Image (cartoon, rainbow, N blue to C red):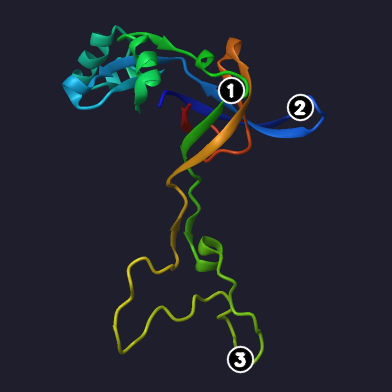
């Protein structure tokens, strides 16, 4: 599906036409440059590779410098592919050529989008915070310091192992998260800004993918 790369700016709120206060996330979207056009004949699928945010040439490898020179653009820091399927999407893909610039104007007020980002890392956490365990309800009868313990993690005689996927303490956050069907509240084309209803994963300044 068509989409663009952007950077999360932060959150704010706007008033709708009926006077409701709508929480919104502000994203700086694009402009993105088409750095590669992939077709089913050459690559097995149809997609556009987009580049976002300039990068110094001295920090770019020689192969990637040639890749960007072929597209007639400066080196980019972030690259992402957006696959195109169906007749309507393929027609949209045919409108874009190597080196073209795609802006936030491809979105319109009222559109629904999917946003992909990396959630905030929360470090090593226990089962209560990580998985929502309730902990031990009763605090008497010698519970001592086991109020937030996970409890039994499996039988000891048979099968004598801990099953894969057992919910236990561990690293929380810092993973790829997709939020679907978020409504575009407003498109500010002059400043490449997109206002989306609700929250999206990631911290301020993190890179996100917006899929139409």
Q: Earlier in the sequence, mark 2 or mark 1?
A: 2
Above or below 70: residue 147: below
Q: Residue furthest right?
A: 19
Mark 2 neighbour density, 10 Å: few (under 14) some (14–19) many (20 or more): few
- The quadrant the N terminus occupies is top left
The residue at 50%/53% (across/down) is 122
> Quarter of the image holding residue 80?
top left
> Is residue 31 something that shows in the picture?
yes
Front-most of 17 and 203?
17
Q: Position of residue 180 (x, y in %)?
A: 52, 38
The residue at 30%/86% (across/down) is 158
Q: Position of residue 82 (x, y in %)?
A: 36, 26
Cα–Cα gap, marks 2 and 1: 16 Å
Cα–Cα gap, marks 1 and 3: 55 Å
Find disc 3 in the rendering and name its residue: 142
Mark 3 neighbour density, 10 Å: few (under 14) some (14–19) many (20 or more): few
SS at mark 1 in the image? strand
Q: Are marks 1 and 3 in contact (CB under 8 Å)?
A: no
Q: Earlier in the sequence, mark 1 or mark 3?
A: 3
SS at mark 3 in the image? loop
Cα–Cα gap, marks 3 and 2: 55 Å
Find disc 2 in the rendering and name its residue: 16
Find disc 1 in the rendering and name its residue: 194
Front-most of 94 and 3?
94
Q: Position of residue 33 (x, y in %)?
A: 38, 14
Q: Closer to the camera: disc 1 or disc 3?
A: 1
> Is residue 78 something that shows in the picture?
no
Q: Earlier in the sequence, mark 3 or mark 2?
A: 2
């Amino acid at each position: 599906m068509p989409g663009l790369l952007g950077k999360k700016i932060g959150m704010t709120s706007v008033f709708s036409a009926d006077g409701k206060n709508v929480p919104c996330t502000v994203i700086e979207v694009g402009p993105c440059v088409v750095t590669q056009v992939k077709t089913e004949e050459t690559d097995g699928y149809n997609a556009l590779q987009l580049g976002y945010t300039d990068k110094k040439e001295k920090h770019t490898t020689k192969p990637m410098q040639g890749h960007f020179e072929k597209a007639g653009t400066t080196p980019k820091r972030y690259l992402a592919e957006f696959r195109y399927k169906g007749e309507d999407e393929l027609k949209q893909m045919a409108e874009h050529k190597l080196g073209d610039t795609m802006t936030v104007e491809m979105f319109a007020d009222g559109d629904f989008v999917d946003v992909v980002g990396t959630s905030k890392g929360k470090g090593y956490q226990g089962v209560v915070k990580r998985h929502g365990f309730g902990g031990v309800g009763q605090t008497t009868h010698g519970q001592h310091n086991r109020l937030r313990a996970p409890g039994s993690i499996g039988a000891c005689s048979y099968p004598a192992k801990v099953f894969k996927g057992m919910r236990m303490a561990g690293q929380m956050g810092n993973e790829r998260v997709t939020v679907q069907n978020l409504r575009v509240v407003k498109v500010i084309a002059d400043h490449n800004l997109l206002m989306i209803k609700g929250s999206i994963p990631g911290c301020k300044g993190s890179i996100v993918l917006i899929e139409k």
